[in-house]
Image (cartoon, rainbow, N blue to C red):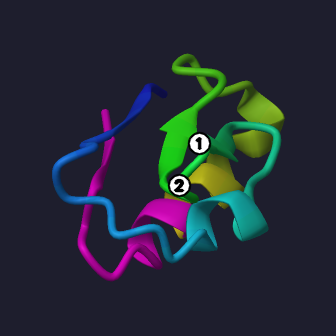
């Protein structure tokens, strides 16, 4: 599983980081960014949950 965050859509709610901090982090403005584009198997469920909880749908899971 791979994840990306669209920086143009992210509004900085930080839900992704709250749900899955091993995959997502926050930049200086509080916008989400990806630490691990290739999600470890043990974090896949939380990464998918983070994507589903993004109000702007800025996270893509593939």
Q: Residue furthest left?
A: 8
Q: Counting other residues with Cα less than 10 Å from the Cα at mark 2, is it few (<14), some (14-19), or many (20 or more)? A: few
Give percent across and percent down for residue 50: 55, 65
Q: Secondary structure at mark 1?
A: loop
* Left or right, residue 31 beside residue 20: left
Residue 52 image-quadrant placement? bottom left
What residue is drawn where x is 51% and y is 38%? Answer: 33
* Left or right, residue 57 beside residue 32: left
Q: Nearer the viewer, residue 49 or 35?
A: 35
Q: Are marks 2 and 1 in contact (CB under 8 Å)?
A: yes
Q: Nearer the viewer, residue 61 or 21?
A: 21
Give percent across and percent down for residue 47: 60, 51
Q: Which quarter of the figure is the C terminus placed in?
A: top left
Total count of labels: 2
Q: Nearer the viewer, residue 16 or 1?
A: 16
What residue is drawn where x is 60% and y is 69%? Answer: 14
What residue is drawn where x is 57% and y is 59%? Answer: 30
What residue is drawn where x is 24% and y is 74%? Answer: 56
* Left or right, residue 40 beside residue 11: right
Q: Is residue 59 magenta?
A: yes
* Left or right, residue 20 beside residue 32: right
Q: Which residue is mark 1?
A: 27
Give percent across and percent down for residue 43: 75, 42
Picture disc at residue 29:
2
Taking 28 as reference, is 18 above or below it? below
Give percent across and percent down for residue 13: 51, 77
Q: CA distance from mark 2 to mark 1?
A: 5 Å
Taking 13 as reference, is 9 above or below it? above
Q: Counting other residues with Cα less than 10 Å from the Cα at mark 1, is it few (<14), some (14-19), or many (20 or more)? A: few
The span picked out in magenta is: 50-62
């Amino acid at each position: 599983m791979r994840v990306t965050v669209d920086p143009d859509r992210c509004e900085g709610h930080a839900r992704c980081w709250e749900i899955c901090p091993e995959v997502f982090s926050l930049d200086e403005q509080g916008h989400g960014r990806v630490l691990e584009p290739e999600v470890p198997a043990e974090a896949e469920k939380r990464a998918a949950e983070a994507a589903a909880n993004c109000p702007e749908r800025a996270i893509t899971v593939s």
